[in-house]
Amino acid sequence: GLSSASIHDAKPGKVGATLTLADGKKIGLDDAASGELASEAGVSISKSADGQLVYEIKAGKADPARINTLSTAKGETYKVRLPDGSLVYLNAASSLTYAASLNERGKRIVKLSGEGYFEIAKDKAHPFVVKTGGQEVEVLGTQFNVNAYSDEAAVKTTLLEGAVQVSTGTVRQVLKPGFQAVNDGHSIRVAKV
């Protein structure tokens, strides 16, 4: 059969994505010029000169209910800097959904479909949580990869440094660097990468 890599990666890949704002407005990011793209609910969304999406919280409070979705098509990848300074590299055919302010009840929460590589800014007071179908990965500040394409049998979480906690239902596993958690929806298997 086809390897999963060949299904998701159309070559050559290009940098591009679509940002859907809380009000439903869609912004195409491949050809958008650098500079401010949108300002909503106390958040400024701009594209840096090197082509990454940058969120900045303006003075005052950001409306936590404002949900944004960043999505890539097949063959597209995109890099986003979240308001807390964390970086997310979104792989092809993936989406990242999050409140514009990032904070929900004291946690930094994002929802991932597809695959993303995360470099999380350290913030001990606000754990960073990546939710995928049926799984949560919680970290304080570290680098890890989550592969959660809907057509894959399992969600794979690979840790590069630091520590992450992977949970599904009542099952919890803490990963050490160089290990991968494979979650098939029933159990979480941990193996060295």
Image: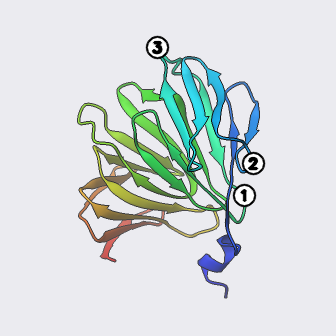
* Category of crowding for the residue at label 1, using alpha-carbon neighbours closer than 10 angstroms: few (below 14), some (14–19), many (at least 20): some
CA gap between label 2 and label 1 equals 14 Å
The answer to whether the residue labelled 2 contacts the one labelled 3, judged by CB atoms less than 8 Å apart, is: no
Q: Please state the horizontal and vertical placement of residue 93, each as a whole percent of the image.
A: 67, 60
Position above or below: 177 against 34? below
**Which quadrant of the figure has residue 178?**
bottom left
Report the amino acid beneath label 2.
Asp
Report the amino acid beneath label 1.
Ala
User: N-terminal of the two: label 1 or label 3?
Assistant: 3
**Which quadrant of the figure has residue 103?**
top left
Q: Which residue corresponds to mark 2? A: 31
Q: Where the N terminus falls, by quadrant? A: bottom right
Position above or below: 24 against 30? above
Q: Closer to us: mark 2 or mark 3? A: 2
Q: Where the C terminus falls, by quadrant? A: bottom left
Q: Which mark is residue 73?
A: 1
* Category of crowding for the residue at label 2, using alpha-carbon neighbours closer than 10 angstroms: few (below 14), some (14–19), many (at least 20): few
Q: Please state the horizontal and vertical placement of residue 160, each as a whole percent of the image.
A: 31, 64
User: N-terminal of the two: label 2 or label 3?
Assistant: 2
Q: Residue 150 carries which label?
A: none
Q: Residue at x 31, y 75 (%)?
A: 191
Q: Which residue corresponds to mark 3? A: 61
Q: Please state the horizontal and vertical placement of residue 151, each as a whole percent of the image.
A: 64, 67
Q: Residue at x 64, y 62 (%)?
A: 92
User: N-terminal of the two: label 2 or label 1?
Assistant: 2
SS at mark 2 in the image = loop
